Image (tube, helix red, strand yellow):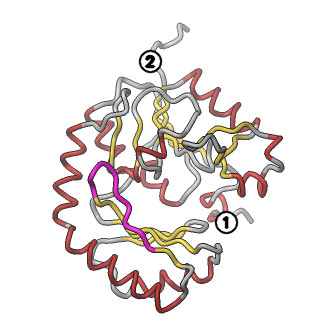
């Protein structure tokens, strides 16, 4: 049987799938000397490392498929990633689709811009309420509005000392005043409130309809429960063992 020239298409999250931050690398793999630096900031400091297994996995995918990164990273932070991606990318939790030259795909950008404008009052109110709640709970809670390319996209809460129990309590409080249609997600150190227009799966669906080249198989690869939306569009799922997805499974 002759080999088909049409490759699989892979939608793949980056962090905790192809690499780990320094802290998580030490937790799951070991000393940084066991890995390769692959996320570098403007000063040259290494922020994330990939293990030999993660390197082998990504190389295998890139040798045999068209890999489209699907990440919560902003455009700026995605450009810090040194993993060999050179084509399209979906960043900012689906808020932007980047073309191969790194510029936003205009069709999707305009869709998100119009949707964000309709949620402008809701996101401002949520930001103010979350900041007030955080100030009353713990001075180490940091509430920020996440923007990218001029778009207000979501509200993120982190605890400077990494206290997940405080983040969980913060989330319980935010749930009481979360705008209609919004969702909360807590994933190992960061609590995010997403508006109804934002989602990795929404950007992936647009990509499949408007940008994807013909493909033989659609694979979804990720670690977080927030990745299940775009993975659900695919034929096959791949998730690391040390992942939120795997831990959510009843393996007994």
Label 2's element?
A: loop
Where residue 191 sits in the image (x, y, percent)? 50, 71
The relative height of residue 43 versus residue 215 in the rendered view (above or below) is below
Residue drawn at point x = 17 percent, y = 61 percent: 117
Q: Earlier in the sequence, mark 2 or mark 1?
A: 2
**Quadrant of the rendered structure where residue 42 is?**
top right
Label 1's element?
A: loop
Residue drawn at point x = 66 percent, y = 63 percent: 247
Residue drawn at point x = 79 percent, y = 45 percent: 32
Where residue 118 sits in the image (x, y, percent)? 16, 65
**Quadrant of the rendered structure where residue 119 is?**
bottom left
Label 1: which residue?
250
Horizontally, is 182 left or right of 186 in the view? left
Horizontally, is 23 left or right of 184 in the view? right
Where residue 29 sits in the image (x, y, percent)? 79, 49
Is the residue marked by circle 1 packed among few (<14), some (14-19), or many (20+) residues within 10 Å?
A: few
Label 2: which residue?
6
2 or 1: mark nearer the eye: 2
Over which residues does the magenta segment extend?
Answer: 143-151
């Amino acid at each position: 049987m002759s080999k088909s020239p049409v490759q699989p298409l892979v939608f793949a999250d980056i962090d905790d799938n192809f690499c780990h931050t320094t802290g998580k690398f030490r937790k799951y793999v070991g000393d940084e000397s066991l890995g390769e630096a692959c996320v570098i900031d403007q000063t040259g400091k290494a922020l994330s490392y990939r293990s030999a297994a993660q390197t082998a996995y990504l190389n295998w995918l890139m040798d045999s498929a068209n890999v489209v990164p699907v990440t919560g990273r902003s455009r700026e932070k995605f450009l810090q990633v040194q993993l060999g991606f050179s084509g399209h990318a979906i960043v900012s939790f689906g808020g932007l689709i980047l073309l191969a030259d790194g510029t936003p795909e205009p069709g999707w950008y305009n869709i998100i811009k119009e949707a964000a404008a309709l949620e402008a009052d809701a996101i401002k109110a949520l930001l103010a309420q979350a900041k007030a709640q955080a100030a009353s709970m713990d001075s180490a809670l940091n509430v920020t509005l996440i923007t990218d390319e001029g778009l207000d996209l979501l509200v993120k809460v982190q605890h400077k000392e990494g206290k997940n129990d405080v983040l969980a309590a913060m989330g319980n409080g935010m749930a009481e005043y979360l705008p209609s249609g919004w969702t909360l997600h807590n994933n190992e150190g960061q609590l995010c409130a997403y508006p109804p227009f934002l989602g990795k799966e929404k950007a992936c669906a647009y990509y499949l309809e408007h940008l994807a080249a013909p493909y033989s198989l659609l694979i979804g690869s990720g670690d977080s429960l927030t990745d299940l939306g775009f993975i659900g569009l695919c034929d096959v799922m791949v998730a690391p063992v040390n992942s939120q997805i795997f831990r959510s499974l009843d393996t007994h």
